[in-house]
Image: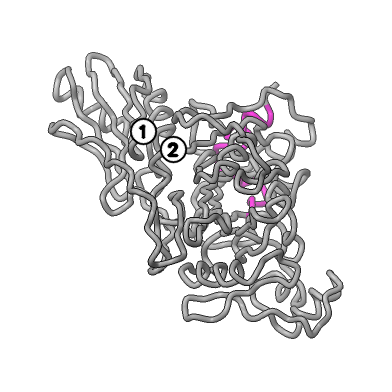
Amino acid sequence: LWGRTARPLHMQAGGSQAGPSSREEPAGRPSGKKASVPMEEELRGRSWATPPDRVSGRKRDGAELARCSGFWSAEGERAEAAASGIAAGERPSKSPRRDGETALVHPRAELDDLQRGLVRQFVSTIDANEESIVITNPRAQGNPIVWVTRPWQDMCGFTYGEAVGRNPRLTQGERSDPAVVAAISGALQQERPCKAAMVNYRGGEGGPAFWNMLSISPLLHRGQLQLYIANLQDYSYHMGQMVSLTPSQFCRAALHYRRGRRLDAPLTSLSLAKPAIYEADGEHPLQPAPEPPPAQPMMRRLGWNKLVLEPEHLADRVGDALSRIDAQYELAERLASGESVVVSARSGDVVMRVLVSEEADGHYSISCARLSGDTFSYHAAFRQLKAALGEALTQHPLQSRGFVTPPTGAARGALPLARALPALTAP
């Protein structure tokens, strides 16, 4: 599947196959292997002072741009035909938009008629020019790629024609955590949605490394698995803001990810980042909704809301910020019924609880509650925490968290990416 060639349970002849544990803890830890000197030189100094406002990359000639842009034109058709041997007359229809145009499907995509219709149905609900999405076919051998968006091509370094028919592991490499890869494969074999953070390589192993925040969701038709939908976010910049903690690779297949979702309305960037089980048939019953998170005790809190960064990363950023202000802390609880993480912290004589939770509108919040200590000391610690969290408390449009091109020249920013990817460089 995502990490190895295997068939899902519904395609195996008899028996069952063990999958990953359903507990909430990360499945993988950073590798301790020492990177080669070229890799260290590749990563050293790569960071960005501010998030990018738009996708940028190397300049392409007209034929290549037409071929990988996500739209088919006469020029792009000739370029694709020359690269892959497809006859010029076998041109698929135009790329998807929300105006109801037919979704682009490559002639080599392994899909039956039902699956082709499902691809078009799903793509009609997204903005294919903004979202980094890859669709795979778990009913074919090796779970091959059948459709990608242009932002996916920019982020992962492969054109649609180069990626179609291949397994999504094409972006994995030496520093991709094998435990995380195995956990993703196990979740997909059990047809479960999952979320992972892992190191991938733009253009495959040997290319630039980047942090990928990955959400994978099954797409069903009348309860039967047909496709997998994966939403990718480049988190290299955000990982690069962590100073005291080492980012870790993980995979979670949480129970609340098994929420049912229909394709009867446009899907936003925020909803695509949340794993779910999509049902294409509007009359087929959805998966039972997960239990809502337990109500938190009423107390006066300070904090921030309308945040868009993933809750796992926000919890790491809280821990990193607390370390930077010399506070003691521990992860007290990860609530299994929702995107909630509780952190207990002590700064001097102040004891407080920090809660990362999901709001009703799908955004996230960080709230702090004083458990003991002087009020003035608590407010001082809160201001220190706010300063240490920095840009994590601002709203970044999810589209701005896509593919970024490392800057050239001496002005590279204060925090090298090598520090944000210690698993790639540490002995």
Could you tell me if the residues under marks 2 and 1 are in contact, i.e. CB atoms within 8 Å?
A: yes
**Hey, which quadrant is residue 40 in on the image?**
top right
Main SS of the magenta segment? loop
Instruction: Give the camera-side residue of 378 and 310.
Output: 310
User: Residue at position x 59%, y 62% from top?
Assistant: 151
Q: In the picture, which quadrant includes the C terminus?
A: top right
Residue nearer the viewer, 225 or 315: 225
* Residue position for label 2: 254
The residue sitting at 33% across, 48% down in the picture is 289
Kind of residue at badge 1: Ala
Looking at the rendered structure, the secondary structure element under dot 2 is: loop
Residue 108 vertical position relative to residue 341 in the rendered view, above or below: below
Residue that numbered label 1 is attached to:
336
170 sits to left or right of 194: right
Q: Is residue 420 magenta?
A: yes
If the image is split into quadrants, where does the N terminus sit?
A: top right
The magenta segment is 405-425
> How far across and down, in percent of the image, does residue 340 sit?
33, 36
- Helix, strand or loop at mark 1: loop
